[in-house]
Amino acid sequence: MNARITDIRTRLAALSPTSLEIIDESHKHAGHAGARDGGGHYVLHIASAQFVGCNTIARHRMIYSALGELMKREIHALTIQAKTPDEI
């Protein structure tokens, strides 16, 4: 596991995920402007009880907040599937 994925996992631990999968798809975007600047492309599948009662936008905001500064440079694109434990 690369250091960036480890950092993403560490930050998302604040959401107490019951399920967490991070897929690095950066290789599919070689030459893309964001990739040239060092930002990675990731797919995130996460389940957390903290998402209960939250709509999709609220769930994504919680994730972006947990990731903080990573969203400014290290992560160029993030595809998110955020569910509650009962939804998986």
Image (spheres, rainbow, N blue to C red):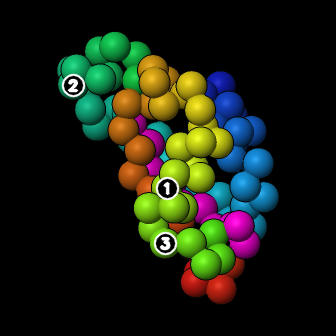
Disc 2 secondary structure class: loop
**Residue of label 2:** 32
Q: Amino acid at mark 1?
A: His
**Which residue is at a point 61% across and 78% down the rendered structure image?**
53
Residue ranking furthest to the bottom: 86
Quadrant position of the N terminus in the picture = top right
Nearer-N-terminus badge (3/2)? 2
Nearer-N-terminus badge (2/1)? 2
**Can I make out residue 84 in this image?**
no
Going by the image, does 65 lie left or right of 85? left
Query: Residue 82 placed where, x, y %?
Result: 53, 65
Q: Amino acid at mark 3?
A: Asn
Tell which of 2 and 73 is nearer to you. Answer: 73
Quadrant position of the C terminus in the picture = bottom right
Magenta range = 40-50
Nearer-N-terminus badge (1/3)? 3
Tell which of 2 and 81 is nearer to you. Answer: 81
Marker disc for residue 71: none
**Mark 3: few/some/many CA within 10 Å (<14, 14-19, 20+):** few
Disc 3 secondary structure class: loop
Marker disc for residue 55: 3
Determine the main secondary structure of the stretch shown in magenta: strand
Q: Amino acid at mark 2?
A: His
Query: Residue 56 placed where, x, y %?
Result: 45, 67
